[in-house]
Amino acid sequence: MRRLIGSLVTTLFLAACTQGFTEFPISEDRQADLPPNVVVTRLDANNVGSFSQQRRVPGSQTVPDSQVWNYQIGVGDILSIDVFDHPELTLPAGPMRSAAESGFRVQADGSFFYPFVGQVQAAGRAPEQIREELQTSLAEFIPDPQLEVRVAAFNSQAIVVTGEVNTPNRQSLTNVPLTLLEAVNAAGGLAPEADPARVTLQRRGRTYNINFNTFLQGGRLTNNPILINGDTISVPRRRIMDAFVLGQIVAPATIDLSEEDISLTQAVTRQGGLADIRADARGIFVFRNHGQVINVYQLDTSTPTGFVLGTRFMLSPNDVVFVTRSPLGRWNDTISAILPSISVADGVTTLAE
């Protein structure tokens, strides 16, 4: 889709260059000759602020249970239980068997069998609680039993990371808290097209929006929640948010607005500024669609004041910045060549969204 928009913009640029030149100032008579849905406005110190649109930063929702973690044993976990000085009560791992292979597996009913004690309920409990229960039960057979209970294999709880990460995966939860940042890193990190400002977290049937950028850039801890069993993290693809700088510019190009706010002056200067000989500094235009209305903003940069005003005019997605040629010529020819291409490009972007 980006290539298609780029092709339309290239067509716009070539068509505009072959048309007549621009006449200034744009009079009311000449505006009357334009289609009724085209509104031309000359930017000045009094109105420039009202036409500037700051990039909207996505908000975040508070995720419940996001800063506390206490692992609870579940079905499928394997427990390793060591009773000190009583090896007969400890399943031997042996040289060819790991603790996970020789441990006590929590069955479907949430319990496991232990010698002398019988069935022990484990699901939903912490290892410390099971240790205390076994210690009390074994005291009937062993004086002052000392034992340790730990999870040898964490099989019961997991989260899923999907979307624009390098290796989408399923990650088991352990007794060490797993944060959103750690989960994304364990999934290979963010892909180049990822949009961390619009991450979603599905938890217990609800979906929460998380602006992960506010943590990455500002350290906001609430936007780096601790994950719990069943969480699904989805990292979306970054939306296309382009503006186009065309006409008598040293390096016409597409400008990416998805990462930061960019002013009209920044967009022009980043592309090398105006072409010294060919450009008419009085004729920097910004074409912007507002539904059925196309607004055209004119900035006169023949004096440094114009570039100062341009720092207060923030570009919006799909804006087309066009710098006219010198000497002066016909405004209507230029705008007539540009308007159809802008409408088509805007329609294509709308379909893409």
Image (spheres, grey):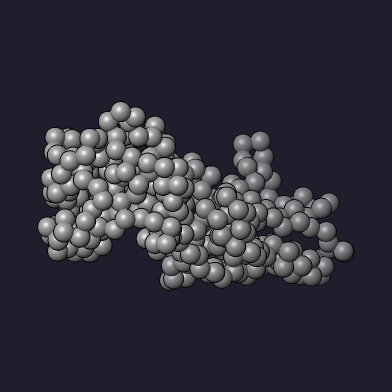
Q: Position of residue 26 (x, y in %)?
A: 23, 53
Residue at the image position 13 percent from the left and 45 percent from the top: 333
Q: Nearer the viewer, residue 73 or 141?
A: 73
Dividing the image into 4 quarters, which one contains the N terminus?
Answer: top left
Observer able to see residue 242: no
Q: Nearer the viewer, residue 233 or 53?
A: 53
The answer to whether residue 275 is above or below residue 122 is above
In this rendering, would 123 be left or right of 246? right
Residue at the image position 59 percent from the left and 69 percent from the top: 65
Residue at the image position 29 percent from the left and 38 percent from the top: 280
The answer to whether residue 151 is above or below residue 278 is below
In this rendering, would 250 be left or right of 66? left
Kindly indicate the quadrant of the structure image that contains residue 39.
bottom left
Q: Position of residue 45 (x, y in %)?
A: 43, 57
Q: How many marks?
A: 0
Q: Position of residue 121 (x, y in %)?
A: 63, 70
The answer to whether residue 147 is above or below residue 5 is below
Q: Position of residue 166 (x, y in %)?
A: 43, 41
The answer to whether residue 15 is above or below residue 73 is above
Q: Nearer the viewer, residue 21 or 322?
A: 21
Kindly indicate the quadrant of the structure image that contains residue 31.
bottom left
Residue at the image position 39 percent from the left and 62 percent from the top: 47
Kindly indicate the quadrant of the structure image that contains residue 303.
top left
In this rendering, would 246 be left or right of 65? left
